[in-house]
Amino acid sequence: MQLNIYYVATLSIALSGVFNWIILYITKKYSFKKSSLLNEKRLVNKNTPPLGGVASAAAFFISVNFLGDADYNFIIIGGFSLLISILGSIDDFFNLSWKIKLFFQSIFVAMPIIYLNIFLNIESLLNLDLNNSFNFLISVLWVILIINSINFIDNMDGLAVVVTGSICYQSILLTYSLNQNKLTDLSVVLLFVILGFFIYNFPPAKLYLGDSGSLFIGFCLGFLSILFTWNSEQDYLLSYALSPVLLFFTIPLLDFLVIMWHRISNGISPTQGGTDHISHRLLAKGFSEKQVLFLFFIFSALNFVLILGYVFLDSTLSTMVLLVYLLQIIFLFNYFRKLDVLS
């Protein structure tokens, strides 16, 4: 059964809202504090259910089926996104080893990439012909990087929702303007599923995404970036390789770089939780949680303006915009890494 995208969007937010309410109602009497994490630094230590991702993934999987024949790929990706959400929920309860999580992430990412024969075409950029084996490897690593960077950014009430929701609306506008309507539909469904969860995650949060949610959303966004078709009209080499969708992930990747730098340089395990994220550093600087959310939303909007300039301006101006983008990344990385960590 195929529905109009407006009906599917309504269904998405309704299912997400209802499923998350059911999760909240069922789990309100249970304890979700992990004894194994008591020695780690956390922003909060509340008994908040971390299963919003399971409800959101279920709402997404059901909703994409109502896109009808929009794309068989979406059904496969939706199914595997549900599997990786289940993996995250198991981790939420049992605190799996990072090696086990990485192993199953690799399996769940590699299977749809190989089965659907979708990939980032890096071989053509490097003038190689390896029968797409290198393309598949880079694509798997890219999606895993996105999954874990989204997982890292889920460190404060509402933050992952604001960041990933911003990526979704940017994807909607860009794919629609470039007539990639199938990806527009997918982005709309994911955005409205996220909004249905946001009702319960806005500070102070009643429900957390948990690993089940951050892995699910990161998985969907990672595959969205691979499915996007980039045919640059610019005449410089980098424009052919640097898909604008990759620039949507500026915040999670910047956060990932900052905490990797901090933890490795201080002899801290990168897999250990902590309050060294860029959001925590802004809190240490005196901003409130809601102000931090607003700052990230505004930055996402301004960054999107740069992305649009990169896509639609002529070759000279597009190059200048890309240079501005790269300079801001260097500046922000140095700025955030020097800020005090939240104690």
Image (cartoon, rainbow, N blue to C red):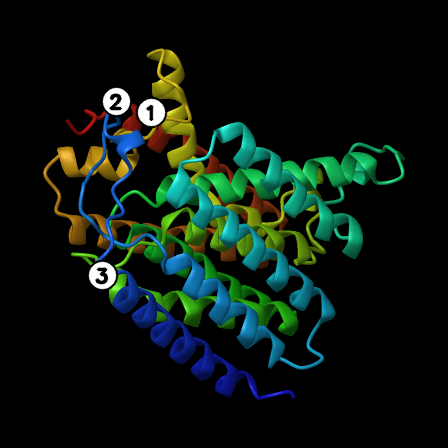
Label drawn at residue 28: 3
Identify the residue at horizontal 48%, vertical 55% (top origin).
217
Q: Which residue is mark 2?
A: 338
Q: Which residue is mark 1?
A: 334
Query: Disc 1, disc 3: CB below 8 Å?
Result: no
- Locate residue 2 relative to residue 330 in the image: left or right: right
Viewer-nearest of discs 1 and 3: 3
Q: Is residue 117 visible?
A: no
Q: Is residue 128 visible?
A: yes
As drawn, 57 above or below 244: below
- Locate residue 264 relative to residue 184 in the image: left or right: left
Tag 3 secondary structure: loop
Is residue 185 or residue 270 the one in the foreground?
A: 270
Query: Disc 1, disc 2: CB below 8 Å?
Result: yes
Tag 1 secondary structure: helix
Viewer-nearest of discs 2 and 3: 3
Quarter location, residue 21? bottom left
Specify the amino acid type for callout 2.
Lys
Count neighbours of disc 1 (C-alpha within 10 A) and say few if under 14, some if 14 to 19, many if 20 or more: few
Is residue 231 or residue 58 the one in the foreground?
A: 58
As drawn, 162 above or below 264: below
Q: In terms of sequence position, does the residue under pointer 2 or pointer 3 come before the other?
A: 3
Q: In terms of sequence position, does the residue under pointer 1 or pointer 3 come before the other?
A: 3
As drawn, 195 above or below 245: below
Identify the residue at horizontal 57%, vertical 50% (top origin).
222
Query: Disc 2, disc 3: CB below 8 Å?
Result: no
Residue 331: x percent and y percent?
35, 30
Residue 269: x percent and y percent?
39, 19
